Image (tube, coloured by chain):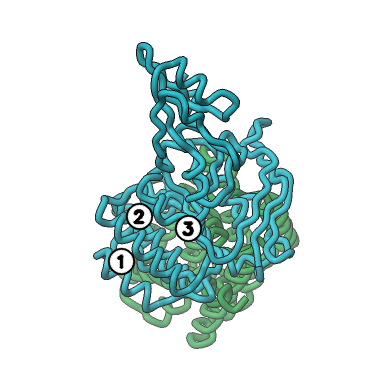
Chain colours: A green, B cyan
Amino acid sequence: MKRNLKFWTRYTWECTGMVLAVAAVLAVIAAFGAEGLDLRALATVVPYFLCIGAVFCIMVGNSGTQTLYVPLLLSMGETRRNVLLGFHYFRALIIAVMLALCAAVWLLAPGEVSAVGLRSIPTILCVLVIASAMGSIMGTVFVRWKWAGMILIILLCGLGGGMVGFAGSMAGNFLTARTFEIASHLAALPWWLPAAALAALALDVGFQWMLLRRQEVKL
Amino acid sequence: MSLHCENVVKTYGGKDVLHDVTLDLKPGKIYGLIGRNGAGKTTLLSILAAQNPASRGTVTLDGEPVWENRKSLAKICCSRELNANAESGLAAMKAKEYLRIAATYYDGWDKALEERLVKLFDLNVKKKLGKMSKGMLSMMTIIVALCSRAPYTFLDEPVAGLDVVAREQFYKLLLEEYASSGRTFVVSTHIIEEAADVLEEVIILHEGRILIEADTQAFVDSAVHVSGKIEEVDAATAGLEVHHPETVGRSKGVTVFLKPGQRVDGSRDVSVQPVSLQRAFVALCGEEAAR
């Protein structure tokens, strides 16, 4: 288990680096798009950029993990059960790191948006869990059904890329008065979102284990 | 300690690829797993290392099942030919990253040996696997296999992409490691002649069945090539296990596998020559191709 923790923890930090890079790019676009640079206002919206980056990176990362790291670790003598546990540890850890980063930034830059942001953490948690499950399902589908999986991955990556692009184009607006309005929507947790997150997670774990326990290692 | 598989069957799309394979790999030996393309060598090694599930049958190490048993799996390393083409996720991975993961997952990883082999093979570990040649990828599989220090180490086609110098280096390293550690190696290869001197035991797999599991020298010694006039050869080999007959005009050549106590009739006008492991293998498994 020790080697599993070591591997997946390191992988979490690598993915965190990717998320930070995406968030930094969005923050730079936002800073250039805004009229006048208000660092405090920028800081309050950076967590949203982190979330967008996290959704994108977690989806792509989980999909890649299923196609690369799962067979690789199986080929190196790890059990299927441990691979599954390690993968879910990584998924839980990266979501926890993202939420902690968002909360830390909002706590360090208090204000109207930050207060709303802190209240939206349950919503962000649900969104990240859904993104994580979708990425994992994409990877599982790809491992099992190659081309059908690939088409699904392209569609979802297109959606993810579109989200990042949209966020980039709207980045300037985040620093205007609309920020509070947009953030307020996230603060309200609709009843169906946690249910959807749980359903996605259950579907993903069940589906993944069903295929993993008979999966053949192909590198 | 022994790695044992009992009545292993593997089925793909309703077709049996392995038929009731029973095998016992004893510690401290170098086995050669040889067979034609599609004989089931990679499938068998993958099942022994729990990389692939068997359709039926069991694999045990010291009496304990290997499947989903980390304690047993920690004693096995199956280093397979890497396929780092554009479709593979491995293509974007750097060689040093691959070795780092291997070092994390193999308990007995020998870092000093890794550094020595990387230097010996002149590998650029900063290079992505997708940018490496077939030979370099073979070197990677050899490094993982040797550095893992797993008591049971399987090498699937380790010399496939290597030039003759690198192949010589590999066999030397294999013997060096074997002499110092006493580990069990199973080497699957197509280049039989070169490997023959290294292999203590030979396992011949043909169409998913084990044809021969024997001491290499004893197996080679049991086979002879008999040639001469057709009627003389037929008379000299009557009642013996004859394979791979080749007829040219009135002359004939056959490979004969002698059981203990059997011999070719020396009173006949035939030439009896020893055969190499490769020739014995072709005689056993190449008959369909010859027909």
* Discs 1 and 2 lie in a common subunit: yes
Location of residue B271 with respect to B81 vertically, above or below: above
**Looking at this view, is B10 or B216 the one in front?**
B216
Q: Mark 1 vs mark 2: which is more N-terminal?
A: 1
- Residue B25, how many percent across, how many down? 61, 57
Residue B162 % position (x, y): 30, 51
Chain of the residue that carries numbered disc 2 in the rendered image: B
**Classed neighbour count for the residue bearing mark 2: other residues with Cα under 10 Å, few (<14), some (14–19), many (≥20):** many
Residue B125 is marked as 1
Q: For mark 1, does the 10 Å Cα neighbourhood hold few (<14), some (14 to 19), or many (20 or more) residues?
A: some
Q: How far apart are the alpha carbons under marks 1 and 2?
A: 11 Å
Q: Which residue is mark 3?
A: B79
Which type of secondary structure does the marked residue at label 3 adopt? strand
The answer for how far apart the CA atoms under marks 1 and 3 are is 18 Å
Percent x, y of residue A121: 62, 73
Q: Nearer the viewer, mark 1 or mark 2?
A: 2
Q: With B221 as the anchor, is B23 left or right in this view? A: right
Q: Amino acid at mark 1?
A: Val
Mark 2 and mark 3: Cα distance apart in space = 11 Å
From this viewpoint, is residue A139 visible? no
Label 1 chain ID: B
Chain on which label 3 sits: B
- Residue carrying label 2: B137
Amino acid bearing label 2: Leu
- Quadrant showing the N terminus of chain A: bottom right
Mark 1 and mark 3 lie on one chain; the one further toward the N terminus is 3
- Circle 3 crowding by C-alpha within 10 Å: few under 14, some 14–19, many from 20: many
- The foreground one among B177 and B242 is B242
Q: Amino acid at mark 3?
A: Ser
Counting from the top left corner in percent of width and height, residue A52 is at: 49, 63
